[in-house]
C-alpha cells in the first residue's frame, strides 16, 4: 500500500476536526466541578426554603388553632351571660306591667316542640303575675296531636274566662295548620302575614294495605289477638268493612270536635263556606276574608299597636346555657370545641 501526501493531509484534517469537536462537546473537569457545585447549592437553597415554609405553616396553623379555641370560649361565655341576663330581665320586668310572649314553634305532641304539658305550665306562670296585661302567642306549627292541641285550646279558653281583661292574641308567622290552627282559634284575635298558611281543618289517618304483596311473595303472617278488632290497622291483613266504618266514625267525631272549637273560638267572624272545614289550606290574605284571621299584622307591629309602652317578657322552657350554645352554633361545632378543650 502506498502513502501519498494528499492522503496524509486529508487524515490530518480529520484528526484536527475530531479534536476540535471533542473539545467542544466534552467539558473540562473544572467546568464539571463548577456546575456540580452550583447544582448542589441550588438544591440546598431549595430545601432550606421548603423547610422554612413548612415551619412557617406549622406556626400559622398553631396560631389559628389557639385563636379558634379562644373564640369558641368567648362565644360560650357570651351566650351564658346573655342567658343569665335574660332570666334576670324577666324577673325585673314582671314587677311592672308586661305582656307575656309564648313562642310555639314546631310539631304538636308529647315530647315534641309544642307539648301541652309545657305550654299549660308556661300559661300558668304568666297568669300568676298580677301585672300581666296580655298574652301574645307567636305561632308557627304544621299541626300534630289533636289531643295536645285540644288541651292547649281548653287551657287558653279557661284563662280567658278567669281573666276576661287580659287579651290573648295569636300571631301566625309561616303556618298555623291543622292542630296549629286548633290552638289559634282559642285566641281573642289572630294576626297573620298575607303569605301565611292557615286552615287544614280536618283529620287524617293513613297507612298501606300490603296484604296482596305478601301473598304474591308467598309469606304467611301469624298474628294472635284477643279481640276481634285488635289488629284492624295491621297493614298485612285486609281491613274489613266493619272496621273501616268504625274507624271512620272516630275520625268524623274528632273532626266535629275541631269544627266546634273553631266555631266557638271565631264566633260571628267566621264566614262558613264549603271549603272552610274541608281540610283545605288558605293563605293569610284569604283567611282574613274568610274570618279565619282578623288582620294582616306582624309580631312587632302587634306589640307596637296593641301593647305600646308595655314591657315584653318571654315565657319559654328553661334551658341550660350550654343548650343555648349548642343550638346557636350547631352540635358539630360544640363537639369540636369539647374535643379541643381537653388537656393534652
Image (spheres, rainbow, N blue to C red):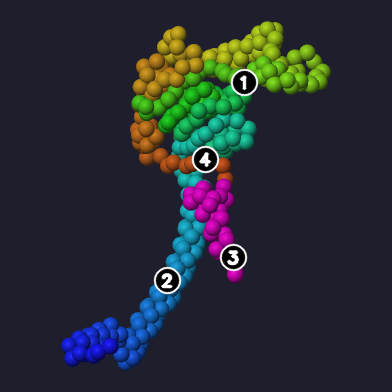
- Decide which of tag 2 and tag 4 comes sooner along the chain: 2
User: Would residue 231 be found to the left or right of residue 20 on screen?
Assistant: right
Magenta residue check for 326? yes
- Decide which of tag 2 and tag 1 comes sooner along the chain: 2
Instruction: Check whether the beta carbons of the residues at disc 2 and disc 3 lie within 8 A of each other.
Output: no
Q: Residues within 10 Å of mark 2 (few under 14, many from 20)?
A: few
Label 3 sits on residue: 342
Task: Identify the mark at residue 279; answer none if there is no mark.
Answer: none
Label 4 sits on residue: 315
Label 2 sits on residue: 57
Give the structural element (helix, strand or loop) at label 2: helix
Quadrant (top left/top right/bottom left/bottom right) for the C terminus = bottom right
Instruction: Check whether the beta carbons of the residues at disc 2 and disc 1 lie within 8 A of each other.
Output: no
The span from disc 4 to disc 3 (Cα, nearest Å) is 36 Å
Give the structural element (helix, strand or loop) at label 4: loop
x%, y% of residue 278? Answer: 49, 13
- Residue 12 can be seen, yes or no: no
x%, y% of residue 69? Answer: 49, 64
Q: In this rendering, which labeled residue sits more in front, label 2 or label 4?
A: 2
Say which of 184 and 129 sits in front: 184
Amino acid at each position: 500500500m502506498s502513502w501519498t501526501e494528499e492522503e496524509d493531509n486529508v487524515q490530518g484534517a480529520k484528526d484536527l476536526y475530531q479534536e476540535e469537536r471533542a473539545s467542544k462537546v466534552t467539558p473540562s473537569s473544572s467546568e464539571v466541578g463548577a456546575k456540580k457545585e452550583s447544582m448542589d447549592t441550588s438544591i440546598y437553597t431549595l430545601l432550606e426554603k421548603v423547610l422554612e415554609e413548612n415551619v412557617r405553616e406549622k406556626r400559622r396553623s398553631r396560631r389559628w388553632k389557639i385563636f379558634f379555641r379562644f373564640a369558641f370560649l368567648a362565644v360560650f361565655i357570651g351566650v351564658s351571660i346573655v342567658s343569665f341576663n335574660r332570666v334576670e330581665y324577666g324577673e325585673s320586668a314582671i314587677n311592672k306591667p308586661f305582656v307575656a310572649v309564648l313562642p310555639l314553634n314546631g310539631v304538636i305532641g308529647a315530647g315534641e316542640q309544642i307539648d301541652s304539658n309545657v305550654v299549660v305550665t308556661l300559661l300558668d306562670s304568666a297568669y300568676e303575675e298580677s301585672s300581666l296585661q296580655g298574652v301574645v302567642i307567636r305561632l308557627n306549627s304544621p299541626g300534630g296531636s289533636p289531643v295536645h292541641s285540644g288541651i292547649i285550646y281548653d287551657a287558653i279558653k279557661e284563662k280567658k274566662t278567669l281573666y276576661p281583661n287580659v287579651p290573648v292574641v295569636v300571631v301566625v308567622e309561616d303556618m298555623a295548620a291543622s292542630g296549629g290552627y286548633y290552638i289559634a282559634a282559642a285566641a281573642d284575635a289572630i294576626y297573620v302575614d298575607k303569605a301565611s298558611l292557615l286552615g287544614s281543618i280536618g283529620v287524617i289517618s293513613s297507612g298501606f294495605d300490603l296484604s296482596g304483596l305478601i301473598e304474591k311473595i308467598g309469606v304467611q303472617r301469624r298474628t294472635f289477638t284477643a279481640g276481634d278488632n285488635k289488629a284492624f290497622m295491621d297493614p298485612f291483613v285486609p281491613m274489613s268493612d266493619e272496621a273501616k266504618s268504625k274507624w271512620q266514625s272516630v275520625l268524623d267525631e274528632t273532626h266535629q270536635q275541631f269544627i266546634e272549637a273553631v266555631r266557638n273560638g271565631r264566633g260571628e267572624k267566621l264566614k262558613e263556606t264549603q271549603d272552610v272545614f274541608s281540610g283545605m289550606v288558605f293563605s293569610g290574605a284569604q283567611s282574613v276574608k274568610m274570618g279565619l284571621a282578623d288582620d294582616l299584622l306582624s309580631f312587632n307591629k302587634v306589640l307596637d299597636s296593641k301593647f305600646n309602652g308595655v314591657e315584653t317578657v318571654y315565657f319559654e322552657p328553661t334551658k341550660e346555657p350550654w343548650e343555648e350554645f349548642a343550638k346557636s352554633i350547631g352540635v358539630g361545632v360544640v363537639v369540636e370545641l369539647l374535643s379541643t378543650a381537653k388537656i393534652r
